[in-house]
Image (cartoon, helix red, strand yellow):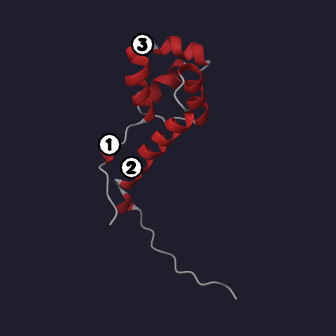
């Protein structure tokens, strides 16, 4: 039997970074964007959950804060999959019956 986890336990990586890393240290989005060499808008959309964490951005956080990029990417993937699973019934694809060619 597969255990189904409620989608609410999956957290968007950007929202987690904002609440657990950026805010506790009193960093501003503008200052962090300048340090990372990215736009303020890019960080803002990430922190607000409007864009997904990219591998490149994950590496920036790893270099700046020591949190592993792999961990952040797994967090983002888990969140994305939970979002897709929430409406998987809307995805009209059936099992493909395959036979091996001789």
Q: Position of residue 55 (x, y in %)?
A: 59, 36
- Residue at mark 1: 9
Picture disc at residue 27 = none
Report which quarter residue 27 is drawn in.
Answer: top left
Tell me which numbered mark, 1 or 3, is placed earlier along the sequence.
1
66 sits to left or right of 25 = right
Image quarter in which the N terminus is found? bottom left
- Residue at mark 2: 82
58 sits to left or right of 93 = right
Mark 2 neighbour density, 10 Å: few (under 14) some (14–19) many (20 or more): some
- Residue at mark 3: 25
Secondary structure at numbered mark 3:
helix
Q: Decide which of 9, 67 is in the foreground and name it.
A: 67
Pair 3/2: label in front: 3
Secondary structure at numbered mark 1:
helix
Pair 1/2: label in front: 1
Is residue 78 depicted above or below 85 in this figure? above
Is residue 39 depicted above or below 51 in this figure? above
Q: Decide which of 58, 94 is in the foreground and name it.
A: 58
Real-space Cα separation, disc 1 to disc 3, in angstroms: 24 Å
């Amino acid at each position: 039997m597969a255990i189904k986890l409620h989608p609410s336990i999956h957290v968007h990586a950007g929202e987690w970074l904002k609440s657990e890393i950026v805010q506790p240290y009193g960093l501003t989005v503008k200052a962090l964007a300048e340090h990372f060499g990215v736009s303020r808008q890019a960080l803002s959309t990430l922190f607000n959950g409007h864009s997904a964490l990219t591998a490149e951005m994950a590496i920036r956080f790893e270099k700046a804060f020591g949190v592993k990029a792999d961990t952040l990417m797994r967090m983002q993937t888990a969140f994305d999959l939970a979002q897709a699973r929430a409406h998987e019934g809307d995805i009209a694809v059936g099992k493909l019956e395959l036979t091996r060619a001789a």
